[in-house]
Amino acid sequence: MPSSRTAAARAGTRSPGAGGAARLELLESLLVASSAAQCAERTLAWLQRRAGVSWGVCMAAHAGAGPRLVPVASVGVPVRRIEQFSVDLELGDHPLTRALLAAGPVMISPNGSRSPVTPLGRRDVQAISLAPLHSRDLPAGLLLVAPATRTLAREARWLSRVVGPRLAALIAALRLEESERRLQRERGLLSSIINAVTDPILLTDGEGRIIIANARAETLLATDDDQSEGRRRAVALNNMLFSAALTRHAIEGAEAPRHEVPLVDPVDGSDLLFELLSTMSSDAREGTGIVSILRNVTDLQRATAELEDNYRKLRQTEADARAERDRLDLVIDSVADPILVTDPGGNTVMMNAPAEHLFTAPEVSSEEAQRLVQANDAHFSSFVSNLFFEGGTLRRSGSISLVDPGTGAALPMEAISGKIVSEHGEVTALVTILHDRTEELERARLYEELKRASAELELKVREATAELVRQNELLRRSHIALEQASALKSQFLANMSHEFRTPLNAILGYTSMLLKGVSGELAAPQRRNLERIDSNSQHLLSIINDILDITRIEAGKMPLTVADFPMLDLIREVLAEVEPLIARSKLTVTTQVNDALPPLRSDRQKVKQIVINLLTNALKFTPQGWVTVTAVCDPVIERMAIAVADSGIGISPKDQDVIFEDFRQADDSPTRQYTGAGLGLAICRRLAAMLGGELSVRSALGEGSTFTLVLPRAPEDDR
Amino acid sequence: MMVQAPPTLVLLVDDYPDNRDIYVQFLTYSGLRVEEAENGHQALDKAFSLRPDVIVMDLSLPGLDGWEATRRLKEDPRTRDIPVIALTGHALAGHSKGAFDAGCDAFITKPCLPERLLDEIRAILAAARPRSGDTTP
């Protein structure tokens, strides 16, 4: 303002006189003008009054980027056309630009070449360039007025010097005001922005004093007197921690990976963790400061801790799962049956060792093995895909014919598959266990064979049984026939013996009568011959009697008459009967019988017959020496033994059975030394058996014989 | 002077002539009277008519056999008390039993020497004598 006053004073001093009062009026009105527009309006109004101007435009020159002439006020110009006066100052050949830069007032006439580009119309316009505030600046503006009067011409330069600086000053003031307003608005926005940031933001000076802090930073680091003791202490602690962090940051530099600042929330006392991000800011006026942003990483830390915890748990779970899986693998591998796990895509997810043997070929394997493995795979895939498409059933079993890739042997397999279904009902996998049915089938085959063989055997047994029945029937018939034949034989023998006896009876009778002299006395030779006849007849009779005995025994027609009798009596009786033979033999015959021998209960007649037979045999076959008859009883087993021993010729072992057969003697030759029919021992053995006892011999050739009759002391049914 | 009792009369029944002959000879030689019969009917006739002291009966006879003849003799009061000695060549069991069942008083198996038969006759007569003596006039 002092400069414009100086200019006005200078103008006043140069143009004193009548116009002096008018100029003063303008100067006063210009001084109180508060804006460029007011200043321009008053100038134009003054020109209307003072110089008779009817049309005018006052334009201000705006410097800076894109300098323009902008209309500020006008007179007699339609409002819609005002903007046409805005001129880009960089267009140097514009008449208005040239007028602006001219040294003095310029007349712009319409009949020039410039008419199409000016909005001046068909009038002559006086252009007055308005002087700048400072001489080096661009002119402050341009005043276009019409008509050009003498007064105007006279006042033009003065106007330029007076209105120009004032207009420039007002424009400058306006601009300053605008810029300050903008600055304040921006500052307010900035403050809202940093306050809106939840992370504390601070600007500190070189000594660490806080210059600017946002709301969050203030809660942590600034305190009021009315706050509680605890809060104040927390804030003091925070300041200490923050300063230490800043110092550490300054020492370690920005290269340090992270600067963490643990602070305390003064409101609730909880621990907070911040990450400090600091940047040096240099300002020419303010000096060096530090901008710090504290990023709240408390949640982050918690999250990290949780994350780590989760990760650790995950690892543990994973390890558990792996261990579980290892155990499962062990179990599965230890199963002898192949096990496969298939996913819904038909891919084998897992298989145990036996399954690998069937479905994977070692790299070094024959083409044949590879082909077999592929065939196995195809069979299995077909089975599994069928099952996947089947709805409903969770389990299925079926048969697959596989082949052992190693040996080429057929493996009839039973496959049992189970679907593994997720909680959403989706089939996630299929577990299949294959079981080799070879043995089972072999067993079944063997069983069938066994059954067949058994049936065959049964048939054969049945046939054999039928045959046996048939044979039995034949046997039975032949047995009957034999019995009939035997009965007929017995009858025949009985009849024959009768028929023999009748004539023999006559022979013996006549001989006896002759020897008794019934027919008169006999000469000695006649008597001797008659005796021979008698002897032979007696022998013949004994043979017939023996045959008859055997016949009776075999026909079961030999009745037993059982009674008690003392054995000693029987032996004495026998000895008495054979006394003639003993006397003739000159042998020493003794008996050894205990007086206390209990009585025997048996058929006396038959026992006697046996003993006589044994004794006569002994006498017959003992040329010299002795014969002993012994009888003993074993009270425990209730048996009595009667033995006849001799010092005779003896019997060879091979003949010891023969002698008990019918019509046999040890010497069976036609020229044998000893007479006899050879029926005696056969009859004796039969009689012994009838009596429940037995007859045996102990002998050696040349060493005599001992025949022993063992009998029960009483018949079985008697005891 | 003692009145001598008439000699014992034996009726000998046998179909085999030689055997009859032996016994007739020997019994006669031994002082007995002997009458012969060669079959059952003849035996019955002679027994009824002659009333012998003892009858020696061969069991195997043609026509009416010894058992039947003996049974009839024992059924008839005239001959009931006459002892019968059965004589047979059959030695099989059953023959002797059948003989006793028929009423025979003794049983002898052939071969039988003449003196043995005599012994048997004497023995059986001795047993029967007291009664016989009472009834004999």
Image (cartoon, coloured by chain):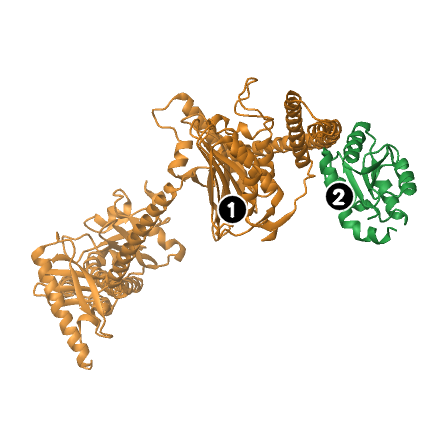
* Quadrant placement of the N terminus of chain A: bottom left
Instruction: From this view, report whether residue A3 is shown above or below residue A257.
Output: below
- The picture quadrant where one finds residue A38 is bottom left
Q: Residue at x 55, y 39 (%)?
A: A611
Q: CA distance from mark 2 to mark 1?
A: 41 Å
Instruction: From this view, report whether residue A654 is shown above or below residue A18.
Output: above
- Label 1 amino acid? Met
Residue located beneath label 1 in the image: A640
User: Where residue A647 sits: x, y (%)?
Assistant: 44, 32
Q: Is residue B113 left or right of residue A22?
A: right
Look at discs 2 and 1 and give the one toward the viewer.
Answer: 2
Q: Secondary structure at mark 2?
A: helix
Query: What shade does chain A have?
Result: orange
Q: Secondary structure at mark 1?
A: strand
User: Where residue A556 sits: x, y (%)?
Assistant: 68, 38
Q: Is residue A574 left or right of residue A376?
A: right
In front of the other: A558 or A629: A629
Q: Which numbered tag is attached to residue A178? A: none
Label 2 crowding class (10 Å Cα cut-off): few <14, some 14-19, many 20+? some
Residue A86 shows up from this direction: no
Query: What shade does chain B have?
Result: green
- Label 2 amino acid? Arg
The answer for which chain carries disc 1 is A
Q: Which numbered tag is attached to residue B122? A: 2
Instruction: From this view, report whether residue A371 is shown above or below residue A154.
Output: above
Extreme residue in the front direction = B1
User: Where residue A204 sits: x, y (%)?
Assistant: 13, 64
